[in-house]
Amino acid sequence: MFKARTITGAGKADMYREIAQQLEGLLAGEFDAIANAANTSALLFQSLPDLNWAGFYFLRAGGELVLGPFQGKPACVRIAAGRGVCGAAVVRRQSVRFADVNEFPGHIACDADSRAELVVPLMRQGIIVGVLDLDSPHVGRFDAEDQAGIEHVAAIYVAACEF
């Protein structure tokens, strides 16, 4: 049985190392992408401060992102590639971090309380299969250390899954 360890007193780099270690243990031996997305989003939501949403969108035929497992308030179900921060990450094929989503052209306000967003594309053999999306009610919540940490989490998730 997996039991998350409380992360206290750590700097961001140490916190993300601990989250990565816990995630590897949590996903060990499980290959289902949905089950692993559910546990990954739960671990992130429980472990990271100042989040109001943590979850997945999966890319479907026609370039549309469809809501997957998440923690937080109900969310937009479908997002076209190129729309909002999630869609921008798909088109750019790279992570998108925005300090204040109200300043992002074309932002989709699934939750009006969200102010900062970090979206990391999920890539397998050069193909985007979805995105990992984190939202915060605090402007400027995510920085380069958060981006690097979540990119590592996304790589662990993708490596554990069969798509």
Image (cartoon, helix red, strand yellow):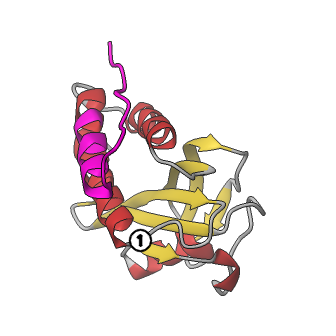
Residue under the point 34% across and 43% down: 9
Q: Which of 117 and 145 is in front in this view?
A: 145
Residue under the point 23% across and 47% down: 17
Q: Is residue 100 above or below residue 141?
A: below
Task: Work out which quarter of the rendered image holds the N terminus and state it.
Answer: top left
Asked whether the viewer can see residue 161, the reply is: no
Residue under the point 60% across and 50% down: 53
Residue 109 rendering spot, x and y as whole percentages: 74, 67
Q: Is residue 145 above or below residue 19?
A: below
Residue 3 rendering spot, x and y as whole percentages: 35, 19
Asked whether the viewer can see residue 68, the reply is: yes
Q: Is residue 20 magenta?
A: yes
Q: Is residue 147 above or below residue 58?
A: below
Q: Nearer the viewer, residue 38 or 137?
A: 137
Residue 24 rendering spot, x and y as whole percentages: 23, 36
State the residue position of label 1. 143
- Residue 119 lies left or right of residue 52; in this view the side is left
Query: What are the residue bounds of the magenta stretch?
Result: 1-22
- Residue 146 lies left or right of residue 38; in this view the side is left
Which image quadrant is residue 23 in? top left
Task: Work out which quarter of the rendered image holds the C terminus and state it.
Answer: top left
- In the image, what residue type sits under mark 1? Asp
Which image quadrant is residue 112 in? bottom right
Which image quadrant is residue 121 in? bottom left
Q: Does the magenta stretch include residue 23?
A: no
Residue under the point 54% across and 49% down: 54
Say few, some or many: other residues with alpha carbon within 10 Å of mark 1 (under 14 / 14 to 19 / 20 or more).
few
SS of the residue under disc 1: loop
Residue 99 rendering spot, x and y as whole percentages: 55, 76
- The residue at the far top in this view is 1
Q: Which of 92 and 3 is in front in this view?
A: 3
